[in-house]
Amino acid sequence: MININQVLFSMLDHKVVQQGVVKKIESQLYKSIVEDSDNDLLAVKMKKYDWSRALLRRALTNINKGYFSRHVLERLSNALLEGAFHRDKTSYRAFVNDYKEKFGVKPPSFLVISPTQRCNLKCTNCYACSDAQTTPHLSYDVFDKIVGDFRKNANGRFVVISGGEPTMYHDGDKTLLDIFEKYQDVFFMFYTNGTLIDQKMADRLEKTGNAVPAISVEGYEKETDERRGKGVFKRILRSFEILRNTGVPYIISVTTTTLNTELLLSDDFYKFYFDEQGVSFMWQFQLMPIGRGKSAFEMVPPPADRLKLYRKWEQMLKNNYPVADFWNSGVLVNGCVAYGRNGGYVYIDWNGDIMPCVFVPYTIDNVNKLYAEGKSLCTALKSPLMINGRNWQNKTQLDNRMHADNLLMPCSIRDHYENFRSHILTKESRGADSVANEILKDKEYYDNLVKYDKDLENITEDIWEKEYLEVKS
């Protein structure tokens, strides 16, 4: 078996051969993603290749600048590359078949867990309704059991931590970093406002080496401070500096609204964060009207702007800026990634409620109850809500990828709200909070989302037909 770390460090230590090695890796990526795959549309395969190449080149740029310590690089390659690519395909296929026989579905590829609702900020339109007074959190024993359950039963190697503010999580003397340290062969990404990252935390992250912070920004100082609080942007820049100097890579997360759309359509925005600040990857999440933002439809980018952002995303990939928009980049993951599908995930919040997605705040099962009954987290995948969601995914997106429905509208709840309410949401489902329950009785909310979906379909359907379905290999 090839020692990935030996190859990686040899390439970095001998820069003269680096360019040739990178070209060879890109050639192999193209062969694997485009030439050897016959299960995707050509235009979909090309988007996946463009994204993979941009991610590779940006990572290498930041590694050469010294923004990844050698220890972090080794730990990430162990957690990501070894676990993802150096497993025996025959035994893994047998595992998947056994899992499907037991739980009725192939295993999800990752989990999202919000261990605490508490946050030191109180951001406008927060989807989680978080602030410093909110107290719900998972016990450390349950948090630990969730990750261990996923690692053992689903062979999971990727866990996303959200919130609330996860760096505020503690149960007794146990914190988030204790989880990172315990599960060394798991890769963690954690969303954070970045204001609590100090040198002590950065040193510990460098030591564990298997966790990458995704720091939230809204634009520059004006936009970030307006939504998150005065002085937050400067604290974020200080956290960037600490992480760079310590050798801990970081990414950013941007909530797209009508207030910052123009910024996200400018080249300077990407140059600032990637080229000047050393960001390795950028997530974009268009404001979803849930939580404190349930009535903020005027801040949701309209379909015409969403299309502009999609075109900008295409351009940024070509310019080697690795950006992914949770909605506009649906082609990268063949549509909706909710409902515990293979290649997707389920979400568990601070109360232990198990939901299809962070943005689908409805639940049937609770992990605390499942564990009290001696059951696995995976049992929740057999709930009617999860099954209905996967049936919709399979019918419209996954079973026949060569004739999939419009993947520029991938989201089950945001882009197909009428169908979600009629055919996915079940009578057994309950809102994870009072706001989610109120939404179900709000006719204006229903009408607004249904209109949004129809308008989006009108401007994207022709693009999907001509630029994806009609493009031949």
Image (cartoon, helix red, strand yellow):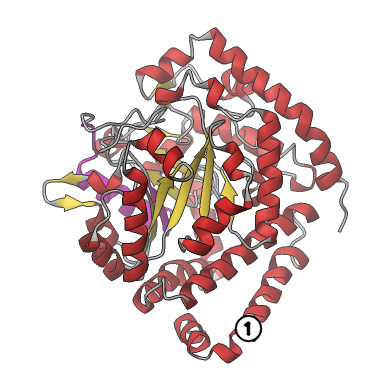
Residue under label 1, please give it.
19
Residue shown at the point (76%, 34%) measured from the top left: 460
The amino acid type found where label 1 is placed reads: Gln
On the image, the x and y values in percent for residue 246 come to 31, 70
Identify which residue is drawn at 59% across, 24% down: 420
Give the side of residue 243 with respect to residue 383, left or right.
left
Give the percent coordinates (x, y) of residue 431.
40, 21
Q: Using the image, determine if residue 400 lies above or below residue 179.
A: above
- Residue span colored magenta: 135-161
Where is residue 84? Give x, y as percent: 50, 66
Q: Quadrant of residue 132?
A: top left
Q: Relative to residue 171, is residue 10 depicted above or below?
A: below
Q: Residue at x 21, y 31 (%)?
A: 135
Residue 64 seen anywhere in this rendered image of the structure? yes
- Residue 152 appears in view: no
* Image side of residue 41 versus residue 280, left or right: right
The image quadrant where one finds the C terminus is bottom right
Q: Assign a secondary structure to mark 1.
A: helix
Residue 331 in percent (x, y) is at: 68, 47
